[in-house]
Amino acid sequence: MAQKLLLKNIKQLIAVYQTAPQKLEGAEMKRLPSLNNAWLAAQDDVIIDYGTMETFPGITDWKDLEIIDCEGKIVMPCFADSHTHIVYAGNREQEFVDRINGLTYEEIASRGGGILNSANKLRETSEDDLFEQSKLRLHEIILQGTGSVEIKSGYGLCLESELKMLRVIKRLKNLNWIPIKATFLGAHAVPLEFKDNKTGYIDVIINQMLPAIASENLANFIDVFCENNYFTAQETKQILEAGKKYGLIGKVHAEQLSHSNGIKTAIECDAISVDHLEFCNQDDILLLKNSNTMPTILPGAAFFLNLPLPPARKMIDAGLAVAFASDFNPGSCPTGNIKLMMSMACIQYKLTPEEAINATTINSAYAMGLQNSVGTITIGKLANLIITKTINSYSFLPYAFGSDLIDTVIINGQKFK
Ligand code: NIG
Ligand code: FE
């Protein structure tokens, strides 16, 4: 029996496209096509139709039809979070306190804290325990309106624990809550065992981890932290090229703490996205302009680490598409609240509300290859939707930056929250 859902009296249905764009670039990001006083119908897990209330469908079959009255409320596609590390063990609030007391992220890392701290915790945690901890975070972000997500490995840093992380991601996928893309981030840091032998660790990534991951089909993407004291541009290229041989598309943590030529390398390797970009310069913007790689800003991490702001406004003004995502992780952004990221996009980066919504829906969906199934209100796309509380306009969402304004979350055509 088909399960049916009808949303009626929607004050405003936003991001509506008969034919959805792949992404929105430059001035297009200011567009937010919408319908006032609208309805939307979903069957099973997809959107099957929508319109204005004058064309309200004459329903003949009321069996198994759930109706939600959205009077005074806005309906939009769920957020797409294209960059997270939500599979991790324990937390790192001590490092938070250390930074308040004056240490930098780099200093903490060089003392064995940071990513290596999380790696120690993760190695000691069983797969089942890791799954339960991560499932709670996945549940939390869905309640906050995220309807598709990318999740990275990268706190294992040895074959066994990287596989453990990726198997947990697979189990999260198998919950069939929301679409999940898995990213292999073995090159997140050099583990202690290889402290003086980075080449040896890269050899493990390429010749042990990659074949094992490919044989279990555990990843869609491959990512590298291209940064001083982590992986150079040349090493990044070597790792991305190796991943490509197994069908893994590249993503890069680039120009976060310094300018390390991550963007240039990512583009040369046809990466789907480059993320962070605090030290992105004018030359990088020109390179991005001639590529299909989605620049992705992670405002939560820049905020949490007090980093300089990436030039998002400049990028959009230069005609680029830009995505915003959370980077939810224990070290640099312990939240996955995309509505809050939208507020930062508007307040700190001077995006308009329309641009912020597009950056966290269709463009971030593109950054993980999901633009054809989520990110807009389009017939045939997944019915993963946010119904807001009663609000005056969508600008109220980023404006009221600390308020929970999400009334209902529809996932696969059914109420999740
Ligand atoms: O995206 N930049 C590198 N990796 C993470 C931080 C990881 C951590 O500190 O645990 C990031 O910010
Ligand atoms: Fe990250």
Image (cartoon, grey):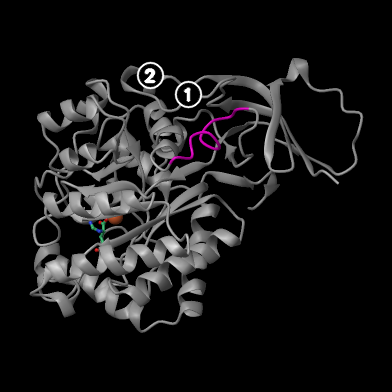
Front-lying residue, 330 or 245: 245
Front-lying residue, 150 or 94: 150
Secondary structure at badge 2 equals helix
Q: Give the amino acid at mark 1.
A: Pro
- Would you say 82 lies left or right of 12 here? left
Q: Residue at x 61, y 61 (%)?
A: 175
Disc 1 crowd, CA 10 A, few/some/many (<14, 14-19, 20+):
some
Which-is-in-front pick, marks 1 and 2? Answer: 1
Q: Residue at x 11, y 63 (%)?
A: 106
Q: Give the amino acid at mark 2.
A: Glu
The picture places residue 355, in percent across and down from the top left corner, at 37, 28
- Numbered mark located on residue 297 in the image: none
Q: Residue at x 40, y 64 (%)?
A: 213
The picture places residue 323, in percent across and down from the top left corner, at 35, 36
Disc 2 crowd, CA 10 A, few/some/many (<14, 14-19, 20+):
some
Residue 211's image quarter? bottom left
Residue 389 within the magenta-colored segment of the rendering: no
- Would you say 375 lies left or right of 226 here? right
Q: Are marks 1 and 2 in contact (CB under 8 Å)?
A: yes
Q: Residue at x 18, y 29 (%)?
A: 287
- Numbered mark located on residue 28 in the image: 2
Distance (Cα) linking label 1 and label 2: 10 Å
| Image quadrant, ligand 1 | bottom left
The picture places residue 245, in percent across and down from the top left corner, at 33, 51
Secondary structure at badge 1 equals loop
Q: Is residue 301 above or below residue 215?
A: above
Front-lying residue, 78 or 174: 174
Point out the stretch of residues depicted in magenta.
369-378
The residue pinned by badge 1 equals 21
- Would you say 139 lies left or right of 105 here? right
